[in-house]
Image: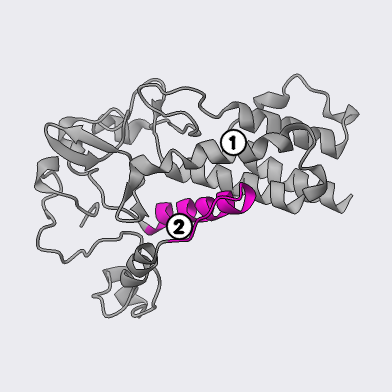
Amino acid sequence: MKKNIILLTALVQLSSVWSSLAFAKTNIKELSLKDISFKALDYALSTQVQADDKYYIKGEFPTQIESTLVPVLVGVGKAIGKDQEATPFTTASVVNMLSQVYLDNPELKNEGPLKQIPEVIRAATKTFSRYETDSTYNFYPSLNDGGTIVHRPINMTLLPVWRGFTNIPNDADSSSVVLAALVFNSKINNEAYQVPQQALDTLSKYRDNERKPMFYNKREDVKNTGAFMTWLFDENDPAMPHFWFAKASKGTRIPFN
């Protein structure tokens, strides 16, 4: 019973990434916790991309972005409909949840949808390479923007003025979930892997030490916390364009400097 509750809890979290419509025609009162968990897992696995298209590559889990009125008015996102947003953050997050379900329930690993998890994870982790630079990862894939390689949304409707603004550096959030997913894959699929020292050094480099605090941190006397920074990039790098609307060709930049 305890294992089923753990499984159900994890899968409810996982299935919430997508939609409750998977259960719209199911009378869950007639199902056991295990059956409900398996249905949630079946639905989650069914959303994995099975073939390359213009937005995703095989093995990724999709993300959709829906804009509200204010962003649309300034040229970010569609007024009607949704944009596709390829990102390793979603795929890695799903992999990490699937891995926990699989590893926490060894007695079920050969039953129902759980037996699919190893191959799903293997396929997902193969997609991370298009987001990687020097052992860390970007939220967006690399794109050729007029001869300049940039990282920005692959599908989101953007006025040209915003394209440089979204040319962002690698970040600790994306890197950490991807690295965790790669470790899980190595454990589940018996594939040799070790987190690169270069990645660990980079994450350790960008921390809140001896930095000029932002005004709200300064007001609260929050400084030198040692916290890991979001962006793996020095905001004082003279190469970073400080004009918000600088073209992508001017280089990578932290949003809002």
Quadrant of the rendering where the C terminus is positioned: bottom left
Q: Nearer the viewer, residue 230 or 195?
A: 195
Residue drawn where x is 19% and y is 40% of the image:
149
Contact? badges 2 and 1 (CB < 8 Å): no
N-terminal-most mark, 2 or 1: 1
Q: Say whether residue 103 is left or right of residue 143.
A: right
Number of on-image labels? 2
Mark in the foreground, 2 or 1:
1
Q: Say whether residue 48 is left or right of residue 38.
A: left
- Please give the residue where the numbered disc 2 appears in the rendered image: 176
Magenta residues, start to end? 172-195
- Please give the residue where the numbered disc 1 appears in the rendered image: 120
- Residue 181 location in percent, x, y? 53, 50
SS majority, magenta: helix
Residue drawn where x is 10% and y is 58% of the image:
239
Specify whether residue 241 is painted magenta. no
Residue drawn where x is 13% and y is 44% of the image:
245
Q: Amino acid at mark 1?
A: Val
61 over 136 or under it: above or below: above
Q: Mark 1: give few (<14), some (14-19) or many (20+) Cα within 10 Å.
A: some
Residue drawn where x is 56% and y is 42% of the image:
94
The quadrant in which residue 196 appears is: bottom left
Residue 78 visible (yes or no): yes
- Residue 237 location in percent, x, y? 14, 64
The quadrant in which residue 43 appears is: top right
Name the secondary structure under disc 1. helix
Q: Nearer the viewer, residue 224 or 90?
A: 90
Q: CA distance from mark 2 to mark 1?
A: 20 Å
Q: Say whether residue 122 is left or right of residue 132.
A: right
141 over 207 or under it: above or below: above
Q: Amino acid at mark 2?
A: Ser
